[in-house]
Image (spheres, rainbow, N blue to C red):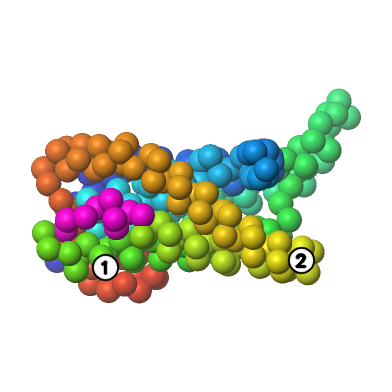
């Protein structure tokens, strides 16, 4: 059986993806006023994971993107669990920062569940749409359009899952609807703004790898992480 080739460049992209995802979740505790809107600090970092996802799907294919998404999910879960252990450990008498530590790193189970489910579904949909559009396009052209459309789908699914699961019963449904639309449009606009950098990154990756490494996936089943 032919072994899947994993390059150093792909490995670095996977590590960066995991770091961006973890940092964005740690930054979610802080809110930032953006004109009339209030957003979380994580919005600055989280779209980078979708940009990296687009680059990986475009150059390496859906199968490897699926592996990276599950890797990011697993690493984020591991960081969360380890932080909770840190919160639960009894502090020494000289430790005066427990309240602040819990505020920043203490996780609300409902928010965590919503965040993990939203990330997994949104990222997988983003990769799926990106891959399907590329396979249906002559010579894989139109990366910019694919990146925007896949981001709209991915970010939309992410917001559509996260906000109702996280805030149903605590916020009015009208406000939840506004949050879904606002977050989706803001994150997609962010990715459109940085699209020139994404295009250069994809071009550079193709140069490093000697062209596209992407192949049509054996299947689009989310759990088939062994299909590389």
Q: In which quarter of the image is residue 40?
A: top right
Q: Is residue 27 left or right of residue 140?
A: right
- Kindly report the secondary structure that dominates the magenta region of the rendered protein: helix
The image position of residue 77, as x and y in percent, is: 56, 54
Dot 1 surroundings within 10 Å: few (below 14), some, or many (20 or more)? some
Q: Is residue 142 magenta?
A: yes
Nearer to me, 171 or 37: 37
Mark 2 secondary-structure assignment: loop
Quadrant of the image occupied by residue 10:
top left
Disc nearest the viewer among 1 and 2: 2
Residue 172 shows which numbered tag?
2
Q: Taking 70 as reference, is 100 left or right?
A: right
Residue 150 lies in the magenta-colored region: no
What label does residue 132 carry, if any? 1
Q: Give the range drawn in magenta.
A: 140-148
Question: Where, quadrant-wise, is the C terminus in this rendering?
Answer: bottom left
Asked if 186 appears above or below 136 in the picture, the reply is above
Q: What residue lies at 53% left-to-right and 40% top-to-bottom?
A: 44
Outermost residue on the right side: it is 93
Give the mark nearer the N terminus: 1 vs 2: 1
Task: List x then y, in percent, for residue 96.
Answer: 85, 29
Q: Residue furthest top?
A: 94
- Given residues 84 and 65, the one toward you in this image is 65
Secondary structure found at label 1: helix
Q: Judge the density around disc 2: few (<14), some (14-19), many (≥20) Cα neighbours within 10 Å.
A: few
The residue nearer to you, when weighing 174 against 19, is 174
- Tell me residue 95's x, y (percent): 83, 29
Residue at 51% in and 41% down: 45
In the picture, the quarter occupied by the N terminus is bottom left
Residue 56 pos. (x, y %): 29, 51
Name which residue lies at 36% across and 60% down: 149
Q: In this view, does 13 lie above or below 168?
A: above
């Amino acid at each position: 059986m032919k072994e899947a080739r994993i390059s150093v460049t792909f490995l670095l992209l996977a590590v960066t993806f995991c770091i961006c995802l973890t940092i964005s979740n740690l930054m979610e505790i802080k809110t930032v006023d953006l004109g009339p809107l209030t957003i979380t600090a994580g919005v600055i970092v989280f779209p980078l994971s979708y940009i990296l996802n687009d680059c990986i799907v475009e150059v390496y294919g859906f199968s490897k993107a699926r592996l990276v998404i599950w890797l990011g999910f697993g690493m984020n879960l591991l960081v969360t669990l380890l932080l909770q252990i840190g919160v639960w450990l009894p502090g020494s008498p000289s430790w005066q920062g427990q309240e602040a530590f819990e505020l920043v790193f203490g996780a609300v189970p409902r928010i965590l569940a919503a965040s993990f489910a939203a990330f997994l579904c949104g990222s997988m949909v983003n990769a799926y749409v990106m891959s399907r559009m590329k396979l249906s396009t002559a010579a894989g052209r139109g990366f910019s359009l694919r990146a925007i459309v896949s981001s709209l789908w991915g970010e939309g699914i992410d917001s559509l899952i996260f906000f109702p699961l996280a805030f149903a019963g605590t916020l009015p449904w009208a406000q939840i609807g506004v949050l879904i639309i606002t977050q989706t449009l803001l994150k997609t606009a962010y990715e459109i703004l940085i699209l020139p950098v994404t295009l250069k990154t994809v071009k550079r990756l193709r140069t490093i790898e000697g062209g596209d490494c992407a192949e049509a996936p054996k299947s689009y089943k989310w759990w088939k992480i062994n299909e590389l």
